[in-house]
């Protein structure tokens, strides 16, 4: 069923109520318009079965999408199709080995321990976002890069600003802010590369430069792949960690579950990712007529695949708005927070490991985790984000 844009927009991307809680809008869309022609000219797909199939469809393109002011992302795996996507992904995969992830988790552990030591010596109050999640993930990604952990807050802001233009509800103000963020990032990363050329080491940036020297990466691919890993190396992981801490604070029974039942931990992390999916959507371009249910979408059309909606589809997840860490992760009910197929997140094993480090350390060191104030949200239609989460540990 395709529904042309009705008099009342079913997805008011810039509406504050929608951004605060899109779940009711998603539910209506799944019921009434699972393939929805939005007024901005895109087709929005909301049901799990359709999204899960399309996200793996090799005939859909990201390279041919118009990213607008975010066009530099076409120099990364995020914006390429095969064979260039395959080439860049292979370069990355050689770096993200199980042994490497194990070592990076130890870096994360040391950073988390340092933060919590400081908290234990004080009044037990901290901002779970900037003091813990951001600080520890940022130090870890900088270790992976082989660089000093500097300009953390600037990088966080520039990353957020780039995300403003990745959703279909962005406007000219968002494009201007995103353009400025790319300019800042470009200058910053070029400076890091210049320093690396003069002072080589064994980090990921050095790996990229070696691949460039071997003719396997262009200069732009090195620059914007570094930008991309800066972004995904702290943004989505930070969100996962913060939402997990928030859940522990609001549902203290999970403190004991996470501490005493190690077998429950993967399910807990999966449910956080499913219910509070960081990036709510991905975009694709049809390169041929594409059948979705009883709808045929012509070639050359933009599809918005609503990951956040798919992850709350009752046909895939019974009681989808309820938190259930015991859900089976079967082939037909695997959440899509990390994507799937060739564009599935390369760093998801590291993300899970980093989140587990934080949650395990918190529940082992502290008996209570409480909110010390109201969270501050910075949601867009593309990104679910908490900018501040005051908590008290005891």
Image: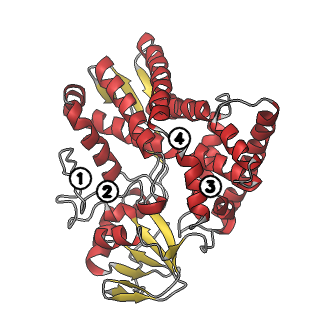
**Which residue is nearer to you in this view: 144 or 187?**
144
Residue 380 appears anywhere in the view: yes
- Cα distance between the residues tagged 2 and 1: 8 Å
Residue 22 appears anywhere in the view: no
Query: Which picture quadrant has residue 179?
Result: bottom right
Give percent across and percent down for residue 313. Answer: 26, 65
Task: Return the residue at label 3.
Answer: 162
Q: Is disc 3 in contact with disc 4, using a CB cutoff of under 8 Å?
A: no
Marked residue nearer the N-terminal end (3 or 2): 3
Give percent across and percent down for residue 255. Answer: 24, 29
Horizontal side, residue 366 vs residue 236: left or right? left
Q: Is disc 2 in contact with disc 1, using a CB cutoff of under 8 Å?
A: yes
**Which residue is nearer to you in this view: 150 or 20?**
150
Task: Return the residue at label 1.
Answer: 329
Task: Return the residue at label 4.
Answer: 234
Examine the rendered structure and indicate whether residue 73 appears above or below residue 238: below
Name of the residue lying farthest toward the top: 121
Q: Is disc 1 in contact with disc 4, using a CB cutoff of under 8 Å?
A: no
- Cα distance between the residues tagged 3 and 2: 25 Å
Query: Which picture quadrant has residue 373?
Result: top left
- SS of the residue under disc 1: loop
Examine the rendered structure and indicate whether residue 257 appears above or below residue 226: above
Quadrant containing the C terminus is top left
Q: Which mark is residue 335?
A: 2
Marked residue nearer the N-terminal end (1 or 3): 3
- SS of the residue under disc 3: helix
């Amino acid at each position: 069923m395709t529904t042309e844009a009705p008099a009342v927009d079913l997805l008011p991307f810039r509406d504050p109520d929608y951004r605060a809680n899109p779940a009711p809008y998603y539910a209506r869309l799944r019921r009434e318009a699972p393939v929805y022609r939005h007024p901005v000219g895109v087709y929005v797909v909301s049901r799990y079965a359709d999204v899960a199939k399309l996200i793996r469809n090799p005939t859909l393109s990201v390279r041919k999408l118009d990213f607008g002011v975010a066009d530099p992302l076409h120099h990364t795996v995020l914006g390429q199709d095969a064979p260039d996507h395959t080439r860049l992904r292979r370069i990355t995969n050689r770096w993200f080995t199980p042994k490497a992830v194990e070592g990076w988790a130890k870096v994360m552990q040391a950073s988390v321990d340092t933060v919590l030591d400081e908290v234990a010596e004080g009044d037990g109050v901290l901002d779970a976002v900037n003091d813990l999640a951001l600080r520890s993930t940022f130090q870890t990604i900088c270790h992976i890069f082989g660089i000093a952990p500097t300009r953390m807050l600037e990088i966080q802001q520039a990353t957020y600003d780039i995300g403003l233009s990745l959703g279909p509800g962005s406007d000219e103000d968002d494009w201007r802010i995103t353009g400025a963020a790319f300019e800042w990032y470009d200058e910053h990363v070029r400076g890091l590369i210049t320093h690396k050329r003069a002072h080589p080491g064994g980090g990921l940036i050095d790996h990229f430069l070696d691949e460039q020297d071997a003719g396997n990466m262009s200069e732009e691919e090195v620059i914007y792949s570094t930008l991309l890993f800066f972004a995904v190396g702290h943004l989505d992981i930070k969100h996962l960690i913060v939402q997990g801490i928030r859940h522990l604070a609001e549902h203290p029974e999970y403190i004991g579950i996470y501490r005493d039942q190690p077998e429950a931990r993967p399910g807990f992390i999966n449910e956080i990712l499913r219910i509070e999916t960081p990036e709510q959507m991905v975009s694709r371009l049809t390169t041929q007529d594409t059948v979705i249910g009883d709808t045929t979408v012509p070639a050359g059309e933009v599809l918005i695949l609503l990951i956040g909606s798919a992850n709350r589809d009752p046909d895939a997840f019974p009681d989808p708005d309820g938190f259930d860490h015991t859900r089976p992760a079967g082939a037909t009910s695997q959440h899509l927070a990390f994507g799937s197929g060739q564009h599935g997140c390369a760093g998801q094993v590291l993300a899970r490991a980093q989140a587990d480090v934080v949650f395990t350390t918190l529940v082992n060191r502290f008996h209570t985790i409480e909110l010390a104030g109201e969270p501050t949200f910075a949601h867009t239609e593309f990104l679910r984000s908490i900018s501040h989460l005051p908590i008290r540990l005891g």
